[in-house]
């Protein structure tokens, strides 16, 4: 496999952070031999090498590790949301994602204000740490991804992944969002400390893990999608019925904030949608759900249907957004993500 990433690092940088970056590259190498390499050394020599590589625009594209794309400012903070019971509503807040810094989007935090392990600031009486910050990060990661996080070394939480490739990819992507991370085999580590503030570091760790996991899941679904073939004409109706049943169950789970059930249904929903989208009759069956009385069914159908019927699906999402009620946040971010992709 040809080298796909070369990371140039100023050798005078902080040793601990350098080592974590090197470890992330080693983990990628373990999953995909020959896929990445890190080079550290004198700043002047690295600048000269970078210039030579950039001159060959056919093969190399410069991207900033500190801030995603060199043209992107850090991502603006999304509003902090609470449930009716007064607890942080992580299942809603995580939906405010944009393009990953890995793909040229804005980093979640600025390079001057990263979330680092074991470096939480001292607190004063006027700024006390939130109670149970570590437990809240665990809860938020589970609500938004279904992944279980457990305390590891001082200042870290360990997250069990499906394999070393998933752990390494998520680790590298999280680092680019200016949140610390490391990985070892199939385990991802993210920072967690009792002094982390709920609306600051706690929110950032949960949001970035959820955002990166969302893209990893999309990668998995895309790989499965490649193996799909159009359904026979006599199978479309049965697939359409299952599509509606699964979406209705997902809607009930979302309305009840049963995030585990909602996640369990997620992959099946994607695959049924993709199967139906392969034929004209299947797309017609999907679009019939744009008039469903269940707002969650309309939300999913309109979001997915933007790929082939934006003129029909966009007004549905705009109506849900403008109602400023159930699913309004999801509709807002579906439209923003579509507009971002479309440029």
Image (cartoon, rainbow, N blue to C red):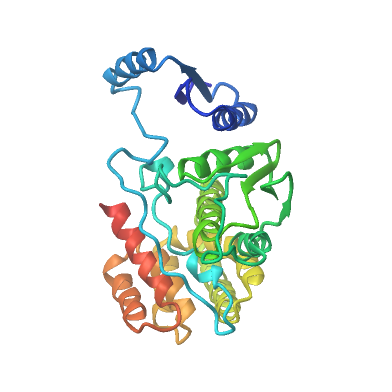
Q: Which residue, as the protein is rendered here, is positioned at the far front? A: 125
328 w.r.t. 172: above or below = below
Could you say where residue 56 lies in the image, as x and y percent from the top left? 29, 18
8 w.r.t. 224: above or below = above
In the picture, measured across the screen, residue 61 lies left or right of residue 155, that is left
Q: Is residue 307 visible?
A: no
In the picture, measured across the screen, residue 146 lies left or right of residue 286, that is right
The residue at the point 63 percent across, 75 percent down is 258
Please give the count of numbered marks on the rendered protein: 0
Could you say where residue 327 lies in the image, as x and y percent from the top left? 44, 77
In the picture, measured across the screen, residue 201 lies left or right of residue 156, that is left
Q: In front: 221, or 168?
A: 168
Would you identify the image quadrant in which residue 48 lies? Answer: top left
105 w.r.t. 17: above or below = below
Could you say where residue 126 lies in the image, as x and y percent from the top left? 51, 66
In the picture, measured across the screen, residue 168 lies left or right of residue 336, that is right
Q: In front: 343, or 98?
A: 98
Q: In front: 182, or 339?
A: 182
Q: Which residue, as the protein is rendered here, is positioned at the far bottom? A: 293
The residue at the point 60 percent across, 66 percent down is 130
């Amino acid at each position: 496999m040809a080298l796909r990433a070369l990371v140039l690092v100023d050798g005078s940088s902080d040793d601990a952070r350098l080592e974590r970056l090197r470890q992330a590259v080693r983990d990628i190498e373990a999953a995909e031999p020959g896929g990445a390499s890190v080079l550290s050394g004198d700043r002047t020599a690295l600048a000269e090498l970078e210039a030579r590589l950039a001159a060959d625009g056919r093969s190399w594209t410069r991207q900033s590790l500190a801030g995603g794309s060199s043209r992107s400012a850090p991502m603006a903070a999304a509003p902090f949301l609470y449930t009716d019971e007064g607890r942080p509503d992580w299942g809603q807040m995580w939906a405010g994602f944009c393009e990953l810094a890995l793909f040229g989007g804005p980093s979640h935090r600025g390079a001057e204000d990263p979330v680092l392990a074991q470096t939480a600031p001292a607190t004063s009486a006027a700024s006390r740490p939130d109670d149970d910050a570590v437990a809240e990060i665990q809860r938020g990661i589970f609500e938004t991804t279904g992944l279980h996080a457990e305390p590891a070394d001082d200042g870290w939480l360990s997250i069990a992944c499906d394999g070393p490739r998933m752990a390494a990819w998520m680790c590298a992507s999280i680092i680019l969002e200016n949140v610390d991370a490391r990985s070892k085999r199939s385990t991802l580590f993210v920072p967690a400390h009792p002094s982390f503030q709920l609306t600051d570091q706690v929110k950032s760790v949960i949001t970035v893990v959820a955002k990166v996991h969302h893209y990893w899941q999309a990668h998995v679904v895309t790989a499965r999608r490649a193996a799909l073939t159009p359904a026979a004409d006599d199978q479309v109706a049965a697939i359409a019925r299952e599509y509606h049943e699964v979406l209705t169950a997902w809607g009930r789970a979302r309305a009840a904030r049963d995030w585990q059930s909602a996640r369990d249904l997620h992959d099946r929903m994607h695959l049924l949608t993709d199967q139906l989208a392969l034929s004209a009759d299947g797309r017609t069956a999907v679009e019939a759900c744009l008039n469903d009385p269940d707002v969650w069914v309309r939300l999913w159908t309109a979001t997915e249907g933007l790929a082939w019927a934006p003129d029909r699906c966009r007004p549905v999402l705009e109506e849900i957004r403008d109602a400023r009620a159930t699913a309004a946040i999801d509709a807002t971010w579906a439209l923003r993500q579509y507009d971002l992709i479309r440029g």
